[in-house]
Amino acid sequence: MYLIPFYPLPSDPNTMVQFRAPDVAMATYFCKSEAYTEERDTTEYLNLLQTAETKNDSVNWTAQDRRTALWWIFINSRKDPMISFGYQCSHCGEEHWSDVNMQNLADDLTVLDVKPEMDAGTITVQGEPYEWICKPLDGHAMECLERMRQNLPPAGRDRKAYERAVTALRLWELVYQVRLADDTEKDFETSAVARHALIEKMDVNTEFTQLAAKVGEMQEKLDHGLKIRMDKGESCLLMPPHPCNSDKFKEAAIRPTTELLVTFRNSQFIPNIGTGSLANLSFQPGLVWRSANF
Ligand SMILES: [Zn+2]
């Protein structure tokens, strides 16, 4: 069993988790991982890879802890830490490839030195006072949002229906980032449904705006892990600036850069032996599988 260095949770660096490096059995198991089961797979993957001594259910970790953990396992178990991201350049219109050494993202890593929650004080609902707490999205929330995102109607057909569904999704995103201070409900979803019903009753221009502003403040204050941005419950990773290499901008001084926001696809971070490499092997008898570099 290959162990990789201890991982301190960025939201709570006193909690250390030990992962082992993924093996072939694990890669085979997760090779069917799809975009719409990413969060569910992430929970399972992070839990299965942990050693018994420090086992800590990753569904309770923040979305940032979870994504940063995938990156941590990736950079500590791969020989080649490069990933290429293709994009259409907004400066010259051409297609560029940005080769990112994922190890360098360590420079962007931040950890919290406070508890990952923020007291939001009293905000009323139809004039009635309630005490609120703001918290980063966690694994439970990400799994719920993923299921909702999967049920979004296609964007092209009925624009209005799509926009309504996205607004509803964003409201849930907010519901999952707040708690009532005196909530004693243990079940995650039951508690969220009750909050949703309460928030729906809020006055849009006063009460709701105040709560949304608190959530924005919390996101800024409690930012941690890699540079991750959330949109519709999906995590995106902010990449280091990549210079445009078009002939239009020959002099380095005027060369514009692009900061890519890439979807943090599990398929890039969870090893995939893929049908391709195995198929190649079966056609080439005697070939030795030299590295575990999937
Ligand atoms: Zn360009």
Image (spheres, rainbow, N blue to C red):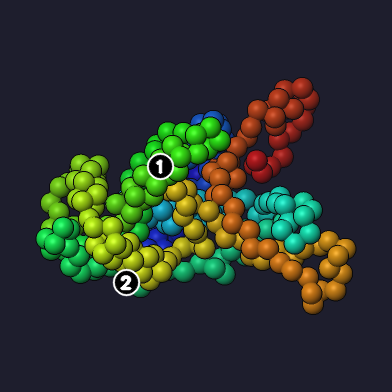
**What residue sits 71% from the left and 25% below the top?**
279
Which quarter of the rendering shows the C terminus? top right
Q: Is residue 202 above or below residue 106?
A: above
The reply to whether residue 41 is visible in this rendering is no
Element type at mark 2:
loop
Crowdedness near tag 1: few (<14), some (14–19) or many (≥20) residues, C-alpha within 10 Å: few
Considering depth in this image, is 7 or 147 the residue closer to the camera? 147
Question: Horizontal and vertical percent for residue 223?
Answer: 42, 66
* Kind of residue indicated by mark 1: Arg
Q: Is residue 276 above or below residue 242?
A: above
* Kind of residue indicated by mark 2: Val
| Mark 1, residue position | 164
Question: Horizontal and vertical percent for residue 284?
Answer: 78, 25
Say whether residue 169 is left or right of residue 34. Answer: left
Element type at mark 1:
helix
Considering depth in this image, is 152 or 102 the residue closer to the camera? 152
**Mark on residue 217?**
none
**What residue sits 81% from the left and 62% below the top?**
245
Q: Quadrant of residue 181?
A: bottom left
- Judge depth for marks 2 and 1 and give the one in front: 1
Say whether residue 290 is left or right of residue 107. Answer: right
The reply to whether residue 114 is visible in this rendering is yes
What residue occupies the far bottom of the structure in this picture?
Answer: 253
Marks 2/1: CA–CA distance: 37 Å
Mark 2 or mark 1, which has the lower sequence index?
2
Question: Horizontal and vertical percent for residue 183?
Answer: 14, 54
Q: Is residue 214 above or below residue 42?
A: below
Crowdedness near tag 2: few (<14), some (14–19) or many (≥20) residues, C-alpha within 10 Å: few
**Mark 2 touches mark 1? (CB < 8 Å):** no
| Mark 2, residue position | 114
Say whether residue 67 is left or right of residue 175. Answer: right
**What residue sits 74% from the left and 33% below the top?**
288
